[in-house]
Amino acid sequence: MNKVILLKNRPKGRPSPQDFEFTEEEKSQIKEGEILLKTKYVSVDPYLRGRMRDEKSYIAPFEVGKPLESGIIAEVVESNNKNFEKGDFVNGMLQWKQFQTSNGNGLNKVDSKKAPLKAYLGVLGLTGMTAYLGLEKIGKLEKGETLLVSGAAGAVGSVVGQIGKIKGCRVVGIAGSEEKIDRIQEKFGFDDAINYKTTKEMKKAIAEACPDGVDVYYDNVGGEILDAALQNMNKYGRIINCGAISLYNKTETPTGPRVETTLIKNSILMQGFTVRDFVKDFGPAQKQLAAWMEQDKLNYMETVVEGFENIPQAFIDLFDGKNKGKMIVMV
Amino acid sequence: MNKVILLKNRPKGRPSPQDFEFTEEEKSQIKEGEILLKTKYVSVDPYLRGRMRDEKSYIAPFEVGKPLESGIIAEVVESNNKNFEKGDFVNGMLQWKQFQTSNGNGLNKVDSKKAPLKAYLGVLGLTGMTAYLGLEKIGKLEKGETLLVSGAAGAVGSVVGQIGKIKGCRVVGIAGSEEKIDRIQEKFGFDDAINYKTTKEMKKAIAEACPDGVDVYYDNVGGEILDAALQNMNKYGRIINCGAISLYNKTETPTGPRVETTLIKNSILMQGFTVRDFVKDFGPAQKQLAAWMEQDKLNYMETVVEGFENIPQAFIDLFDGKNKGKMIVMV
């Protein structure tokens, strides 16, 4: 029998274990052209919370009573498809099942000799490319500028900051614990860091950490931290709206200070962004990230949880910041 | 004696006649290299309200007790500068004085034979270029797309919509009276128009007028109309934040629904913008606008108020929408 995790209810506010349902199905037989995949590593990411809402977005919402899905590294255990051999490892958007069949569409083979398999869900995967392509395509970050990053100790934020340092920028991170503040400076080499949980006046704290103002703000959190960043943006500043984890669990439409006059005064850009907007740039992005990895210029951290049955809780824990870096479940 | 208009107080909320002071000074004598200018036409524009605040912005704030300034067409009445002759007309940022001296820096000669002098303050001046460059450089409007414009009967909005039609787009305008709604459809050729003063559900009204969604929103007003537009933006939609007249007279920081999750969901761009960001493109922009004028593709309207002493009131009237198209004072 094959274990499967379904969306039981659309979460109200913070997701809870009751929003997920474990079920079993018979293992499918593969047909001509198909492969049988065994799940090895499952990526859990904040953006999945958005897909649990019944709302039009860049990606179709999950359906209640149907399996959830996310980025997964799987092993090919049987193959009727000439492009895949038994023993290959693949990366793709796959369902939260122990085993599943696929015709191979949308799957990329990954090489376990070049990098640890898990890295393909993180720094060499969508996470790393989200950091790199957001900075390149929207931030257009240039040497000597000041880069501010929220969610700075997280999977995306930590890569964003390190790329900023590689590019010769002043990099300031925002995170929510002293341990994270230390980590982003010591392990990831940020120039300065702000603990938003112990800082009363974020606007002032950002101004002090960024004496030349902020040229690029890479935002993973939204909400009041975004408001404070906006008040510190330089003329022609760019804000990469990558995530808004502070708002994902809100049940009412959140309000805040209006942005339009601030944008006009300093010709500021805000651009919503998902890495899927730049699929055609994935090749060069992966190549650049892999090169920096080889040159030891990119550190990363992972929190690895073990066990298929712990996937929902690992996801829920993201909203308490329990992960250090990329959150991955090893099956 | 030479009449001058000073900023007496920084307005609180809506500007009032008491915020302006009329004074007189002796007419200056011109020195070597200088010219004496006689003010002919004065442009009054909503953005001047922003300069009356003591806030850092794209342009220095006005000083209390000092003369105000705006775009002005003036006649050269004396010249000690080899680049200008008596009888020339010039366009530039000049002070609200009947006469003033200048060394010629920042002034452009205008040709009264090619177009009426007033047109250089409107469709062929900063107003027309604001419309054109915002659409070109930020909106990147393409044939077949849907363009939504607020302040659509105004000086900038009416040109924006006409350029949209020239480019082969569906163009929908938003304005605040039945007369304006008729005007933008009949005189300016918009496909549809919405009277926001008589419409209860703007979000729904925009959805109905834009059955394929909105690709580019050219915003001159901000506030709740921007909120409604945001809810109708297509994937990869672009919002040109050119003005926020609905907020300029607010005394407290205005609040509204947060934008970040909406931006992320559909990879939407918001870009604050002032025409001065594109000074290097003024030449080609003016050429294109003049060509369209010659081909009878651009209509425009002006409200011309007579008398130097009426400049402040003409400015104040902008906030009641009393102008039809570009508001100009003829001295």
Image: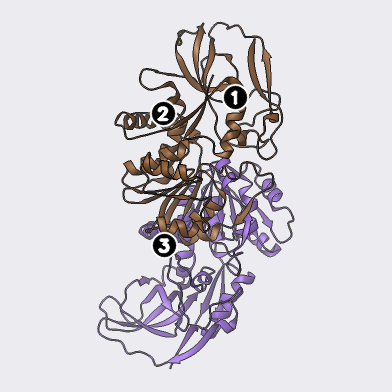
Chain colours: A brown, B purple
| Up/down of A159 relative to A271, above or below | above
Q: Regarding mark 3 in the picture, which secondary structure is present there?
A: helix
Circle on res. B66: none
Q: Name the residue nearer the viewer: A315 or B170.
A: A315
Query: Badge 2: few (under 14), some or many (20 or more) residues near its Cα, within 10 Å?
Result: many
Q: Indicate the position of residue A79 as horizontal and vertical percent values.
A: 50, 7
| Residue B293 visible in the current orientation | no
Query: Which residue lies at the image location 46% right of the left edge and 55% below the top edge?
Result: A268
Label 1 lies in what chain? A
Q: Nearer the viewer, mark 3 or mark 1?
A: 1
Query: Badge 1: few (under 14), some or many (20 or more) residues near its Cα, within 10 Å?
Result: some
Q: CA distance from mark 3 to mark 1?
A: 56 Å
Given the image, on which type of amino acid does mark 3 rest? Arg
Q: Quadrant of residue B268?
A: top right
Q: Indicate the position of residue B238 as horizontal and vertical percent values.
A: 53, 47
Tell me the quarter of the image containing the N terminus of chain B: bottom left
Q: Regarding mark 2 in the picture, which secondary structure is present there?
A: loop
Query: Tag 1 or tag 2, which sits nearer the N-term?
Result: 2
Given the image, on which type of amino acid does mark 1 rest? Asn
Q: Regarding mark 1 in the picture, which secondary structure is present there?
A: helix
Q: Nearer the viewer, mark 2 or mark 3?
A: 2
Circle on res. A124: 2
For disc 1, the marked residue is: A310
Judge from the rendering whether residue B323 lies leftward or rightward of residue B279; answer left or right: right
Query: Badge 3: few (under 14), some or many (20 or more) residues near its Cα, within 10 Å?
Result: some
Could you confirm whether marks 3 and 1 are on the same chain?
Answer: no
Q: Indicate the position of residue A321 as horizontal and vertical percent values.
A: 54, 39
